[in-house]
Image: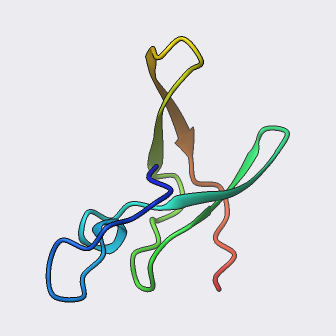
């Protein structure tokens, strides 16, 4: 997930262009992820969270969409 989207075209953000979301909150095993309008994934789809730990090692965590809360 990218926290700082950049624009790569006339008014089109990277998050929207690549259908990426942003983690807005983590409570225990639950992730709240915000997506651009019209780009929300379907229930039971996989979400892949990519990041880097404190030792600069890359990691991927695969999550499953369980509920859609809307706006």
Image spot of residue 59 (x, y percent): 46, 22
User: Residue 67's spot in the image, x, y percent?
Assistant: 67, 63
Please say if 62 is above or below 34: above
Which residue appears at 54% of the width and 11% of the height?
A: 55
Residue 16: image quadrant is bottom left
Where, quadrant-wise, is the C terminus in this rendering? bottom right
Counting the numbered discs, the total is 0
Residue occupying the point 69% across, 75% down: 69
Q: Is residue 11 above or below residue 55?
A: below
In this rendering, position of residue 7 left or right of residue 29: left
Colouring convention used in this rendered image of the protein: rainbow
**Residue 15 image position (x, y, % from top left):** 36, 67
Which residue is rendered at x = 26% and y = 73% of the image? 7
Toward which corner of the image does residue 20 lie, by quadrant? bottom left
Which residue in the rendered view is the most extreme toward the right? 28
Which residue is nearer to you in this view: 55 or 34? 55
Q: Is residue 70 above or below residue 64?
A: below
Of residues 57 and 42, the one nearer the viewer is: 57
**Image x and y of residue 14, in percent:** 29, 67
Which residue does the image show at 47% across and 47% down from the upper left? 47
Q: Tell me: 6 left or right of 61.
A: left
Relative to 45, 33 lies left or right: right
Which residue of the protein is positioned furthest toward the left in this rendering? 9
């Amino acid at each position: 997930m990218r926290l700082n989207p950049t624009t790569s075209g006339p008014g089109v953000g990277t998050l929207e262009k690549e259908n990426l979301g942003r983690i807005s909150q983590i409570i225990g095993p639950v992730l709240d992820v915000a997506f651009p309008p019209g780009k929300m994934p379907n229930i039971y789809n996989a979400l892949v969270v990519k990041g880097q730990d404190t030792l600069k090692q890359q990691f991927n965590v695969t999550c499953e969409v369980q509920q859609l809360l809307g706006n």
